[in-house]
Image (cartoon, rainbow, N blue to C red):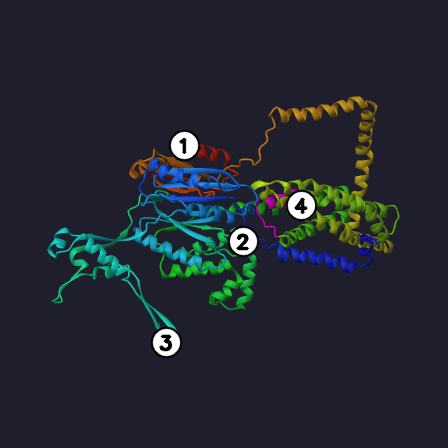
Amino acid sequence: MSLAAFGVRKPVVANLVMFAIIGAGLIFGLGLRKEFFPEVSPSQVLITAPYPGAAPDEVEEALAVKIEDQIRDIDDVEEITSTVREGVAVVRIEFEEGVAIDAAVADVKREIDALQDLPDEADRIIVTKLEPNLPAISLSLYGDADERTMKSFLFAVRDDLESIPGMGDITISGVRIDEIRVEVRPGAMLRHGLSLPAISDRVAAAMAELPGGTVRGERSTLSIRAVGVDERAEEIRDLVVKASPGGQVVRLSDVATITDGFVDSDLKSRLNGEPAVSLTVFKVGDQDVVLIADLVKAYVKGRTGEDLELTMSERLRLTIAARGEDPRMLGSPEVSAISPRLAAWRLGHDRWLEAPPPGTLTTTTDLARFVVGRLDLLTRNALFGGLLVFATLVLLLNWRVSFWVAAGLVVSLLGTLAGMRATGVTLNLLTMFGLIVVIGILVDDAIVVAENIASRHERGEPALVAATRGTDQVAWPVVSTVLTTICAFLPLALIEGQIGDFLVWLPIVVACALSVSLIETLFILPVHMAHSLRSQDRARARGHDNVFTKVDRTMERAREGLFGNYIIPGYTRLLKVALEYRYISLAIALSIWMLSLGLIASGRVEFIFFETEDAETVDAQVQMPIGTPANVTDEVVRSLERAVLDIQSETGEIVSVFAQSGASSDINGEGNAANATHLGQLILARATARRSSGTSASASARSRASRACGSRA
């Protein structure tokens, strides 16, 4: 018994399989984790050797050369790259494919620990594996508030975000480290008979925590420690630096001025021309990048007092949970269960009621929008593709074939999502590209099977017999077509290196989609076609013609007239000419083939692995000569910033301008950040809403910004 015959005889089983596929796709598939790109196994080790205050030549001679000589004999090393800057040396080791990166890190650490004759002033050398962390979204606070207030607010925001489940790693930039400054007054110091080393030793001793032994009891053993003074200016002022036998004491405030401040740093950051502090959330491990961005944006809306626009499902769940009461009275656990976005918004809104932000709080770089955009594209392609397939089939075939083929497309897509969940595939830019490509392939086999069933039924076979025999007649050609397509994509899984790590998921997605489509075509579709055609026969036998039957009969007559009077005769005449002048036909085919090869060989048809898209972010890197003072670098960055702000005021294409001097960061997450007085950076974000309607204006603004900054977009 064939698969089609079993399904036709047991339609309940086939329908249960179909509903199981649909349910699995809705439950498991729609919950697929979303990310930018598939996870890539790290193959690089990063060695960071700080040498504060040393010139690049001194850093190279004292650290970089010694490190390179020490690690040169490590096995399976493909390439060693060293970068030397003022005060630091960075050595990047790239290992061959297949090397266990954790074992490689251990080997490098062992070699680094064996280094001798290192400068005493050099800090500890750090060895880590290079795992690029892609930023999900950035949050900035800018305005005229004082630095202490802005820093305290941003740290409070970080604490709130870290308390939200599903949040990634958070890093803060643009803030300086706290510092307690003790400025000794020379006159007071000499008057009390003190020296600077004595004061320094007393302060260090008072702030140190020392072990005081243990106390053993009958039930437990307690460790005792001498706790140092709290690192606060008020506590340090009361430190006793000298005591006389008569009981007179000299406190630190008597000989020095103690103030709270910040470490003197050359780093300055601004957003839209105003001082700014920033916070960036990175996706870590198996976290959902779209969920992270949604949570941060919901929190920002609440923290700034804005209303959150709920989705339809969130409104429905909120209404059910409230049971007619005021939804605002729901507790935090209930809200978290209803919607993580709503819980994040409520957290921010509660903080806003306590104290509004001391400036403008906004999200600046939402990289998760690329994933959301590709998901929207996939949804639109599936929707419009299904509608176009249905419309095309209705014009060329009867409406029953069209309906069940289009329904099979939906079942196949949902089954593909469930199969991706079972195989551990995530929704990323590459797998979504595979889904978009495979949408057009899914309906081909269903069209062949459904049309063959309909043709046999029109020739007089009973509906159930036509469904069984029609499917069996083309079953093996359909299986061969599916296997051929899967095998055509399989070589992508054999590519080695990071490109292979990216592309290996594409054949898996194609295999899942075509496998589910094959089950739907050979098992589920014949059942629906059989019972649909049998219902049609019964209606005709009773003389009941519904609207669909009349429309289908009219379209059938129109199709027969179109194909019988125009298309088939025209095709027959063209075929006769091609067969009569077969050598000319063969010459035309060979000419087209040679022309195609010539276009590729001449370079007129270029090979581009990844097409460059219209960028929404301009990254301008400023590199002054090494040793340039921080104020000079900042002045250059300010001049570029003013030029870009002028463009922003004229065109409105640029929505945010982030500028920093004294540092340079990597917006691609590849770990190329650096701090130096000669470095600066501008990051421009242009409006996405006007992307389609204002392409020429966008290109003009982008080119003007690039000319002003001397950067690359």
Marks 2,4: beta carbons within 8 A = no
Secondary structure under badge 4? helix
Q: Quadrant of residue 199?
A: bottom left
**Is 73 above or below relative to 33?**
above
Which residue position is annotated with label 1? 710
In the image, what residue occupies the spot 41% across and 48% down? 113
235 drawn magenta = no
Residue type, label 1: Gly
For disc 4, the marked residue is 510
Q: Mark 2 Cα within 10 Å, few/some/many (few <14, many 20+)?
A: few
Helix, strand or loop at mark 3: loop
Nearer the N terminus, badge 4 or badge 1?
4
Left or right of 257 on screen, residue 1? right
Q: Position of residue 539 (x, y in %)?
A: 83, 55
Binning the other alpha carbons within 10 Å of mark 3 as few (below 14), some (14 to 19) or many (20 upward) gives few
Amino acid carrying mark 4 in the image: Val
Separation (CA) of disc 2 from disc 4: 23 Å
Whether label 4 touches label 1, CB < 8 Å: no
Per the rendering, the mark at residue 217 is: 3
Which contiguous range is marked in magenta? 424-439
495 horizontally vs 101: left or right:
right
